[in-house]
Amino acid sequence: MVFDQFSDKLRERLKKQQEEEAAKAEAAPQGFLQKLQSGIQKGIDVLNTDIGELIPAAAPASRAMDRLKDGLKRTRDGLMGGVMDLFRGKRIDEDFWESLEEILITSDVGVATSTQIVDRLRAAVKEQKITEPAALTDILREDLTGILKTVESDLMLESGLTVIMVVGVNGTGKTTTIGKLAWRLKSEGKKVMLAAADTFRAAAMDQLQIWADRVGVDIIRLGENADPAAVAYDAVTAAQARGMDVLIIDTAGRLHNKVNLMEELKKVRRVVTRQIPSAPHETLLVLDATTGQNALQQAKTFGQAVDVSGLVLAKLDGTARGGIVIAIAQELGTPVKFIGIGEAMDDLRAFEATEFVNALFVTTEEAAAT
């Protein structure tokens, strides 16, 4: 709006100036008039190009942050809403600390992590002689950012073929995550192939086929109940032959406490490693953020079985207790590669600690509007 108003006023002024100078055309030297008209036209051209280009260039970053805040709204209202209400209080006493710890624990931050956060805030109050709860807002923000920075990590991509093995229990959003990841990588110019190694469920293979068709990438699949390791072997061979940049292997969704199924995952991994010694280059575990502390247990068990290199926290838009991200960072230290904040294709977001924490905190302006 500001640029539009500015543009209209400047155009009117330039037009008026052009008309005034045209009235003096007969008296003015021809060369001078041509230079003047040329200068005016250049000014109009700048308005039509440079200013117009500034607006869309700034918009995507703003929209991306708004989308993140929208996706984290439930967690933001549930976790940080309770914290910020507490921080608007008048006193820092034992009741204050107990209430803060309770809010964190019930938001799936976990008992151990909640206690550690509260202890650090207590120390800050004593050291800095803080008396007003509101003064703890920035300290808590820095503390959470520091915790989450320890698990901030980019996806590892090789110069040749990158093999990504994706694991997780049924219902976590694993196959959907694979589809969105394929779309993300293809958007970055990568040649992507999918492998349907979840052969125990025909629906899983069909779902992955739908994603492959939607994204426009190749897929390798065998029949129902085929050996998952055989699918992985064929997929690696095909990916190498076709000059693919990334191969994403879907695996059977399974309960983390089923020993025989976890052994099957190890077998798939061994087959891939025999073909490419450094592969799989990433083993991503997809966790459903709405399952809270159970997700933490899954991360521990899968990590022991298949050497998980990174986590994807799906369905963060569906929970008011997204503190599990903090618990995982503090208790496990496993890198968090991506977070899922919605159903749209680009709602699989690379995890960035500062951006994540900023999206959780309510600004002064937003608080006043509520």
Image: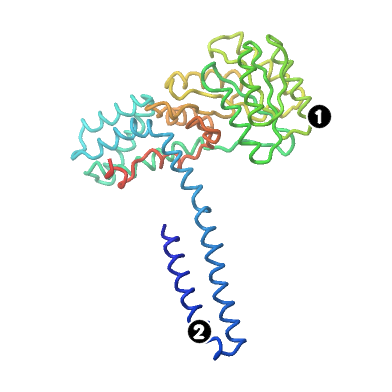
Label 1 sits on a secondary structure element that is: helix
341 to 141, vertically: above or below: above
Name the one closer to the observer, 233 or 66.
66
The amino acid type found where label 1 is placed reads Ala
Residue identifier under label 2: 23
Is 186 on the left-hand or right-hand side of 353?
A: right
363 to 28, vertically: above or below: above
Name the one closer to the observer, 160 or 113.
160
Q: Mark 2 and mark 1: span between their CA atoms?
A: 74 Å
Q: Image quarter for residue 238? A: top right
Q: Image quarter for residue 37? A: bottom right
Task: Write the residue at 34% across / 31% down.
Answer: 79
265 to 332, vertically: above or below: above
Label 2 sits on a secondary structure element that is: helix
Task: Write the residue at 79% across / 31% down.
Answer: 242
The amino acid type found where label 2 is placed reads Ala
Q: Earlier in the sequence, mark 2 or mark 1?
A: 2
Residue identifier under label 1: 241
Residue 234 image offset from top left, x and y in percent: 76, 20
Name the one closer to the observer, 281 or 26.
26
